Amino acid sequence: MKAGQILVADHDGVYVIKMVGDVRLTLCISFDQFIDSMFKNAHFTSVLFDLSEAEAIDSTTLGLMAKISILGQEQHGVIPVILASNPSIQRILQTMGFSDIFVIVDKLDEPVFAEQPLNCINCDEQQVKEKVIEAHKLLMGLNASNADTFRNLVNMLENC
């Protein structure tokens, strides 16, 4: 499996977030910092996730994607779009309840480009733990199945 990478671009307030390969929590701090800066941009209008080259996405990354949708709806009244052509990625999105908070498509009329890679930021274990907890609590809030799936993980992380 190809190592994970997150590429980003801002096209006049339309943010493109492209995930490539096996995207894991090692990018969670830099991804979360990007999310914060994206929503601080006065020209923000929408978000498009391109998952067409993603092979796998871990639950922490999915939780941060959910954060983008929730904040986008609360702060700007926009529902992000996810381009997902891989059947296994589509299945994960459906299982997590993403069809309730995203528009999910399997193709676009025009190509999209994201070329700026997010770099892995070295951070302490506590910062990563806090992001993992936050991401999983967001997923838990989407549906009862997610709450059941991630409850023990969140409890364990909060108590250690």
Image (tube, helix red, strand yellow):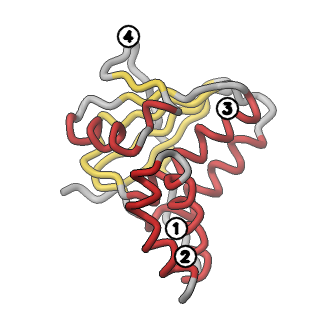
Q: Quadrant of residue 29?
A: bottom right
Give how far across and how far down residue 80 sits, in percent: 55, 29
Give how far across and how far down residue 43 sits, in percent: 76, 28
Q: Which residue is mark 2?
A: 129
N-term-proximal mark, 3 vs 1: 3
Against 55, residue 155 (above or below) is: below
Circle 4 packing at 10 Å, graded few (<14), some (14-19), many (20+), is few
Which is in the foreground here, disc 3 or disc 4?
3
Would you say the residues marked 3 and 1 are in contact, meaning their CB atoms lie under 8 Å apart? Answer: no
N-term-proximal mark, 1 vs 4: 4
Would you say the residues marked 3 and 4 are in contact, meaning their CB atoms lie under 8 Å apart? Answer: no
Under mark 3, the amino acid is Gln
- Dot 4 falls on a residue whose secondary structure is loop
Q: Which residue is mark 4?
A: 109
Q: Which residue is mark 3?
A: 73
Marks 1/4: CA–CA distance:
35 Å
Residue in view at x 38 percent, y 53 percent: 5
Would you say the residues marked 2 and 1 are in contact, meaning their CB atoms lie under 8 Å apart? Answer: yes
Marks 4/2: CA–CA distance:
39 Å
Left or right side of 105 for 124: right
Against 92, residue 159 (above or below) is: below
Give how far across and how far down residue 117 sits, in percent: 48, 50
Checking the image for residue 132, the label placed there is: 1
Circle 3 packing at 10 Å, graded few (<14), some (14-19), many (20+), is some
Which image quarter is the C terminus in?
A: bottom right
Against 121, residue 105 (above or below) is: above
